[in-house]
Image (cartoon, rainbow, N blue to C red):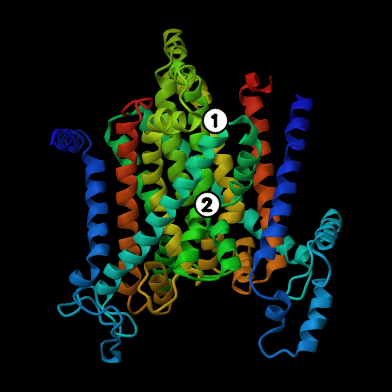
Amino acid sequence: MTSYIVRRLLAVFPVVFLVVTLAFFVFQLIPGDPARMYAGEEATQQQVERIREKLGLNRPILVRYITYWKGLVHGDLGTSIYFHTSITDLIGRRFLNTLQLALIAIIAATVFGLIIGTVAAVHRGSIWDYSANLIALLGISIPVFWLGLLLMLFFSLYIGILPTAGNATWKHYLMPSFTLSTFSMAFITRMTRSSMLETLGEDYVNTARAKGLTERRVIIFHALRNALLPILTVVGLRFGYMLGGAVITESVFAWPGMGRLFVTAVNQRDIPLVQGELLIFALAFVLVNVVVDIAYSFIDPRIRH
Amino acid sequence: MRTLRRTSSTIAYFIRHYKIPSVGALLVLLFLLMGIFAPWIAPKDPLHVSPRDSLKPPGREFLLGTDVLGRDLLSRIIYGARVSLLIAVAAVAIGAFIGVVLGMLAGWERKIEMPIMRLMDVLLCFPGIIVALSIVSILGRSIENLIIAIALYRIPQFSRLCYGLTLAIKENTYIEAAAAVGVSNRRTITHHILPNILAPIVVQVSLMIPGAIMTVAALSFLGLGIKPPTPEWGSMLQKSIVWSRDAPHVMIFPGAALMLVVLGFNMLGDGLRDFLDPRIKKV
């Protein structure tokens, strides 16, 4: 078991190495002189040179690449050009904000997705099934920012019971986490339904029924447990993407997280910040998937071998 | 003539047995036609500014009302279909082409499998919107760059799919037979493997387009996509926020258009998957 976990964790390194390397070199492709871009249109040649010196842009690219790595090893992602502060500090607090939001969203999405999907599969062809399918279809089709805006229009502007922006009180969490979870909830519902339909037709489910187990027991411990594997993959993927992909939700609700910071970084062409965030996104995504893989081996011990 | 008859009978079968996907196809067709024939369908000039008509609610003169500059919302939504669909279809087509080629090569040739698939893994670490935003930050904003940005994220999706499929098909005896009678590698790939993996590719295309449409709108919504005054749903939504209290129609209609076209593609895609992919039982 331990060796399996260690093996999976070691597999993180090549991906992280590739991400850092790609993120570093791809952003060298930006046309034009970066130092001049940072300095602004009206800067004198002298100012531009000073900035070039400060950013280390006058050194050869390989030296800069190695320096970047040296920083990373010490947890230093460099300095933001727009905010003039340490990127590690900038990201730290915001990562926690995004993590909170994503956790609430993925838990809600998983719980409701599992329940709705299971009910739909068990009562296949019934009105419950059709409603679940309809809700799931609408859920994957509704544009995230439109949903967020409509919620805001209704609950904040018309009824006035929920705040529109920020993350100060628990009330601030309701609309963003609902908005963020909708797509995943719909996705997990569909996955659960189709996965359950498959296991419900298996022989061991019939055996369980023949043994005289209650239907509830058969569904939860025999059918659902075996249906969980593909669902878990989806949950992991969605959660991994949420950590980086809350861009739109965070922008709509002015949530002080990683996604909104990324939009600012892109808008300001703050390349070190873009690179730093990309690295954190990839790291979070890969780690979540490793955790999912390990969770797999608990649900299905065959996978360890 | 014979193929024509066969095609039309297949379509008839599809419509009869796949009611919901057919509705989806109809929606898609509607928006496609709307986009293509926008200049003929739109009742007004989508760029015509008229301060006198600012934020008019839906009514007889302006069917869906006007925005803050007094531009006809219906005409802007019709023209918006044009930009969104053009970019989404182009991006998915390019992504599919490159992805299919890379995936099949990686599946066919052991030597290049590692570099291609590892690169794809890295791209898959990021949500589509992050990849697109990064590309826009490098290349700048323009329709061409937007297509590249959105296409890039579709490449790994297609290459993953085709890589797996190619690996599976390669094991078949008819591939071995082709090699035995001296069919070239290139011909084996294009004439023996590609036709066999075409159906899942078509399904994937239809399921990728809605995501691409959403990404176009999302980028514009974030102010990093289509530049105003070009009518585009996402940027219309962005502009609508300030006025939504007094003029909710400026927020509701562009979003509804976006949702309908995405819904159409999703309904169609689901049906195509059941129809073309025999491995999945019809549910």
Residue A302 spot, x, y in % from top left: 63, 18
Q: To which residue does mark 1 refer?
A: B108
Q: Is residue A91 above or below residue A107?
A: below
- Mark 1 secondary-structure assignment: helix
Task: Specify the quadrant of the image occupied by residue B46.
Answer: bottom left
On residue B247, which mark appears?
none
- Which amino acid type is marked by label 1? Trp
At horizontal 52% and vertical 22% (from top left) the residue drawn is A221
Residue B199 in the image: x percent, y percent? Answer: 36, 34
Tell me which numbered mark, 2 or 1, is placed earlier along the sequence: 1
Where, by quadrant of the figure, is residue B235 drawn? bottom left
Q: Kindly indicate the quadrant of the structure image that contains residue B20.
A: top left
**Horizontally, is A245 left or right of B14 in the view?**
right
- Chain where mark 2 sits: B
Which structural element holds mark 2? helix
Q: In this view of the protein, which residue sits in the foreground, A179 or B156?
A: B156
B281 or B34, nearer to the observer: B34
Disc 2 target residue: B153
Residue flagged by tag 2: what amino acid is it? Answer: Tyr
Viewer-nearest of labels 2 and 1?
A: 1
Q: Residue shown at 62%/30% (left/top)?
A: B110
Outermost front residue: B182
Which quarter shows the C terminus of chain A?
top right
On the image, the x and y values in percent for residue B45 come to: 25, 80
